[in-house]
Amino acid sequence: MPSAMLAPSRLPSSSTSYRGFGLWHDAHHHSFTSRKYRQHIHTRYPSEESDITAFEEDGLEEPSIQMGRTRRRSQWHRGAQPPPSNSSLGEGDLDIMDIDKPLDYSFKIRDQVWIRTSENNWYHGVVVGQHPKIMPLASDKSGNHEEPTHGAYYMVEFRICNNIRKYFAPLNGEIKPDTEEVRQLLREGKWL
């Protein structure tokens, strides 16, 4: 039986490299990781927190087990409140007269939002993408754009019959923050 196929309990407790498999076992992480990952985290970044951030910034594939991040995610899923939005507008500062009008607003990951689908139905969702995509905005009926012509699109996960992830732009009027003002407009329009 090859040594890489041994059960983790039978592996040596020190860091060991298994030739031919390109794998590395670290007693601290309790997992097999690729040589590229091992070199990346142990050469450039000394702390576990910076390892995770550095991997995201470099666009490298994440390992399957990341203890720090998993702990934070599980705490959020157990009922802790998501972090507040870093938007430039406060809840009382929103000037929303019509639910379909464009809104200049910045969203953060885990922000609760309302989105309008292509069928003109409104659904509750959560912003799930780390960074918005900058793409051309939808044009008006005459084919002309009002300023600006490009805007931020946020990935939102929402549920119709199963979970769906799509991009929505506030400047297209298709995504709104989950505030009392927005809920009131949705009630008036008979969406809630």
Image: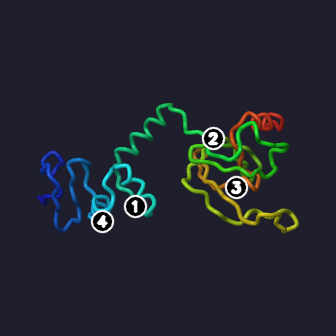
Q: Secondary structure at mark 3?
A: loop
Crowd tier of the residue under label 4, counting other residues whose Cα lies within 10 Å: few below 14, some 14–19, many 20 or above: few
Label 1 – label 4 distance at C-alpha:
10 Å
Residue 146: mark: none
Specify the quadrant that holds the C terminus.
top right
- According to the picture, the residue beneath numbered tag 3 turns out to be 169
Q: Which residue is mark 1?
A: 61
Q: Which mark is residue 36?
A: 4
Of marks 2 and 3, which one's residue comes earlier in the chain? 2
- Seen in the image, is 130 located left or right of residue 141? left
- Mark 4: amino acid: Lys
Give the alpha-carbon distance from disc 2 to disc 3, as whole Å.
Answer: 15 Å
- Looking at marks 1 and 2 on the same chain, the residue that comes earlier in the sequence is marked by 1
Report, in whole angstroms, how far the alpha carbon at label 2 lies from the one at label 4: 37 Å
Residue 22 drawn at (x, y percent): 23, 65
How far separated are the C-alphas under marks 4 and 3?
A: 37 Å
Secondary structure, mark 1, is: loop
Q: Earlier in the sequence, mark 2 or mark 4?
A: 4
The quadrant in which residue 134 appears is bottom right
Q: Look at 61% across and 57% down and name the residue there.
A: 132
Q: Position of residue 34 (x, y in %)?
A: 28, 62
